Image (cartoon, rainbow, N blue to C red):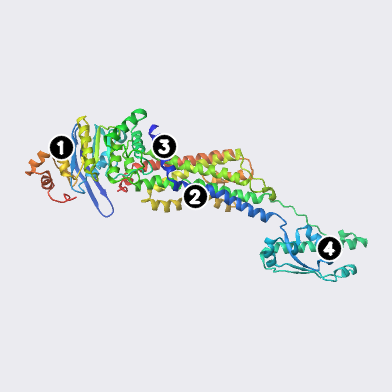
Amino acid sequence: MIEVNNLHKSFVSKKNTVKALDGLSFSAKDGEITGILGPNGAGKTTCLRTLYGLLRADEGYATIDGIKVTEEPIKARKLLGIFPDKFGLYERLTAYEQIDYFASIHGMKGADKHAAIEQILNDLEMTELAHRKTVGFSQGQRMKVTLAQALVHQPKNFVLDEPTRGLDVMSTRILRNHLARFKEKGHCILFSSHVMQEVAALCDRVIIVSNGKLAAQGTPQELCDLAGEKLLEEAFVKLIGSDEGVAA
Amino acid sequence: MMQLKALMVKEFKEAFRDRRALMVAMSMALLMPVMIMVMLKVAIKEAVDNPAVYVKYTGEQHAPKLIKALQDENILSFADVPEDEERNWNERNIELTIPDTFVADMAAGKPIELILRADYNEKSLSSPIRRIKDIVREHSLTIGYKRLLVRGIDIKLLQPIKLLEQDTSLPSSNAVMISLILGVYLMMAAFMSGLPVAIDSSAGERERNVLEMLLCQPVSTLKIVLAKLSCASSIAIISIILMLVLTSVAMNFVDLTKIGATFSIDASTFAILLLLLVPICFLAASLQLLFAFQAKSFKEAQSTVTMLIMAPSFIPFALMMMDDKPAWVEWLPISGQSLLMEDVFKGLPIDWSALLFSSVATIGLTVALVLILAKRLTSEKVVMSLS
């Protein structure tokens, strides 16, 4: 369960002040996949970064399973599996070593850890990649490694920042199936995306963020009804009040 | 604890797989013994008193005793010059002309004029010329004394004043100089060897976008910093050990007894040097990390951090220049250790209280830097500059 409560965040520089979050509130429940939609610069990544505890909100707070991120960041992060906006790989490690590294950071050890790593490698169909050094991996392969290291400890809550960018159809399907399975097991999944079909197909609830504020929320169908449109894309454009960012 | 272990294992794996950074780190250690050896060889060559000098004689058959006296001091006839040095000595062209009238004039007690022809401005000739002059004068004086003696005159009359010279310089002053340089180099190695690894694991990771992911993980920044610190400083320590071992091996190839010096890195010297340098390695690694994390890119880190890190490694040089050292420099990090190292190389007893104090000061400073860095990594600014 992830809850965001009245988040405000401004980035102040000498020349100008950017208000990235302006009282954003929403919650993502266990056993549901929640999608965040929003045009570029709407504050999605800022919001997610606040969730990881990388940024401090000026006002308001975020909780993961009831734990305030600002107060106990390490405890909160333990409950999270994170697929960040920007990610890189340790290019001198193999995929396996890298996943192992993140599993260890999450406190896994011994046979359990190895079983979990094998499991996630199988689930993401990347056993062949496992013992290759990650230098020279394709974008899709890199995404898979990053996903594997985010999911290896079977976190109660997933936060994924555009997890399907750069993935081919097969990999996207694998990921979707994976997320659906976790949902059934009662995990809480929050992910941001630009792909409307994906959000429509996968998400139980959609949160539309615009200008750092909650523009609308509900099931995809509810949003379409709210906007009086048939397609989620049309509804999205209508709800955020402009067509900026849709092309992205 | 387990997290820390995982973090450290990863840092070491990455460091040892980055061959290029490792090579740079170790290159100082490998070059150092070679440099010391070359420097020693040169020093020995200069210090050894009587390298052979070859002189072109004219009329040498007239003064066999003088020629013999010269020969005793390793001043030889050009006729005997070895082939590989012939060109050299031919060019230097020292000529000594003994007149045909030598025997007759000597018998008659008349002054004899020998001619020494050479390029007096040529610096490399100043020592041979001085030696030839000394021997000729000595030879001439001996004959003069004998003449006086046979006439029943005490030769002490010719020396109303005698100057007794007492040289207080240590016989092994050259070796001391070289070991001081070794000290400075060890200090620099401690400071520089971990640098490539430190930059790669901080600014490099930031540039490769892996830092953000790590900072999102449930691990305290203190552990992250400690893992990186221990990796970079270990590389520096390995480099120093390698340098010391290679240097002591290299010393076996240099005959130091020729300049009356003894210099060896025995077990206890080795241990004391390590004891002195290990805290420096940690301090250096923490400084490198602190500055490298602030740099915006790998390149910037490389240039600015190298400059910043060079500064402390020049402290030993500055100390060498200082005549009146205030007492507190003995207690400070870096300067304290370099003074102590000087003592070790001079063979003086170790001031254990100074060692303890400077080590504690160094480690204290390192701890402070680590805490500052750990704090800094939690701040938004670091994250902001990620994007």
| Quadrant hosting residue A154 | top left
Residue behind mark 4: B64
Badge 2 or badge 4: first in the primary sequence: 4
Identity, as a three-letter code, of the amino acid under mark 4: Pro
Please tell me how crowded label 1 is: few (under 14), some (14-19), or many (20+) other residues with Cα within 10 Å. many
Q: Closer to the camera: disc 4 or disc 1?
A: 4
Do discs 2 and 1 share a chain? no
In-image side of B237 versus A200 (left or right)? right
Identity, as a three-letter code, of the amino acid under mark 1: Arg
Report x, y in % for residue A178: 23, 35
Badge 3 or badge 2: first in the primary sequence: 3
Q: CA distance from mark 2 to mark 4?
A: 62 Å
Residue behind mark 1: A205
**Chain of the residue under label 3:** B
Q: Residue at x 20, y 47 (%)?
A: A42
Q: Quadrant of the N terminus of chain B?
A: top left
Residue behind mark 2: B312
Residue behind mark 3: B9
